[in-house]
Image: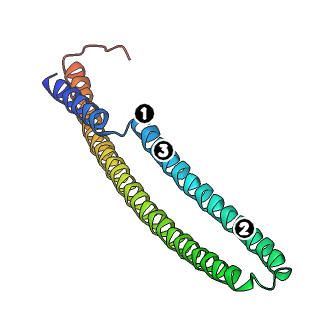
Amino acid sequence: MPENEQMLQDILETVNFIKETAVTKKEFKGFEGKVDKLDKRVDGLDKSVDKLNKSVDGLDKRVGEVEKIMGGFGKRMGGLEVRMTSIEIQFGEMAAKITELDLKIGEVKRELEEKIDTKIAALKDEVISHIDALAHSFQKFEVELVALKARQDRLEENHRLIAKHINLKLST
């Protein structure tokens, strides 16, 4: 009887350990929500890049309009060329800023992917270790079950022999 109580106590401790250390669905969903938020932020950055590209396209159109106007004004050409150079410089600066922003977005995206991959790997390792511990516990319980079954068989055999010895008929 004390052995059964000890076995039940061991099982209860194992179940409590699994319950305390397991990753909950809520925690996993929270991590999933963070990944979704990061995706939304990256999408927002992509939209900002698209807006900048549209602004650059708008500047390209304006530069084209300025070139048309300059064709009809021979005397004002010198002043317009200065302005055009200024616009080209600004366009170059904006293009450089867009390129720099593209690089920063790429870096942020790579960092996020690395962090997410690291977190996922850690979670996988933790789940695998819990499963391994659970499998080990089941193997231990199976060995104990076999030992208890053998002991029960021996006790039943002894009981049968004693009954036979005292000529007692047992019901089966």
Quick check: 149 above or below 64?
above
Q: Residue at x 28, y 43 (%)?
A: 137
- Front in this rendered view, residue 32 or 129: 32
SS of the residue under disc 3: helix
* Alpha-carbon span between mark 3 and mark 1: 10 Å
Q: Give me the residue at 58% from left, 74% from top.
A: 90
Between 91 and 144, the one lying in front of the other is 91
Q: Amino acid at mark 3?
A: Glu
Pinpoint residue 60: horizontal percent, then vertical percent: 73, 72
Q: Is residue 160 above or below residue 120?
A: above
**Between 114 and 43, which is closer to the camera in this rendering?**
43
Look at the picture and state if 171 lies above or below 40. above
Of the numbered discs 2 and 3, the one sitting upstream in the chain is 3
Q: Secondary structure at mark 2?
A: helix
Image-based side of 89 in relation to 115, left or right: right
Tell me, for residue 57, which label it has, or none: 2
Q: Which residue is mark 1?
A: 26
Q: Which residue is mark 3?
A: 32
The quarter of the image holding the C terminus is top left
Mark closer to the chain start, 3 or 1: 1
